[in-house]
Amino acid sequence: MTVPLKFERIITMTVLDTPEQIAEFRLRTLHKMLKLEMLGMTRRGQSAYSIIKQETDLKGSKQKVYDQLSEYFELKRELDNS
């Protein structure tokens, strides 16, 4: 006879309710999409690379733009933690 185990999941949610939070979340999502594009994934419509370049005025190849965004998020995290 087996006894069923009960597992509970703790779910935490964060509410993004300011325009700055929403914009940062969107930019982080585009950053992750750019990583997938560099690995070969495609999508219909405008690429994440072109959207990022239009909205941030970053220059360079996909890898350089990705690295610049990574550095930006790293610096932002350091500033937020201090």
Image: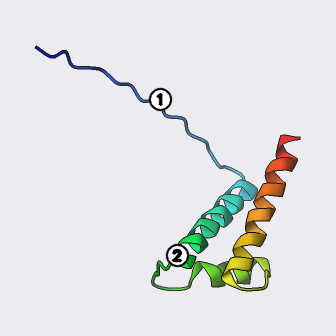
Q: Residues within 10 Å of mark 2 (few under 14, many from 20)?
A: few
Tell me the kind of residue under disc 1. Ile
- So how many labels did they put on this image? 2
Snapshot colouring: rainbow
Which structural element holds mark 1? loop
Quadrant of image for the N terminus: top left
- Asked whether the residues under the numbered discs 2 and 1 touch, taking CB atoms below 8 Å apart as contact, a structural biologist would say no
Give the percent coordinates (x, y) of residue 25.
65, 58
Q: Which is nearer the eye, 32 or 18? A: 32
Quadrant of image for the C terminus: top right
Which structural element holds mark 2? loop
Camera-near label (2 vs 1) is: 2
Give the percent coordinates (x, y) of residue 78.
84, 48
Q: In the image, 38: left or right of 40?
A: right
- Where does label 1 land, which residue? 10
Give the percent coordinates (x, y) of residue 32.
59, 66
Quadrant hosting residue 74:
bottom right
Residue extending farthest to the left is: 1
Task: Identify the residue at horizontal 84%, vertical 56% (top origin).
Answer: 75
Q: Earlier in the sequence, mark 2 or mark 1?
A: 1
Quadrant hosting residue 30:
bottom right
Q: Is residue 19 above or below residue 58?
A: above
Task: Identify the residue at horizontal 19%, vertical 15% (top origin).
Answer: 3
Q: Residues within 10 Å of mark 1 (few under 14, many from 20)?
A: few
Q: Which numbered dot is residue 39?
A: 2
Give the percent coordinates (x, y) of residue 55.
73, 78
Q: Is residue 71 above or below residue 3?
A: below
Q: Which is nearer the eye, 56 or 35? A: 35
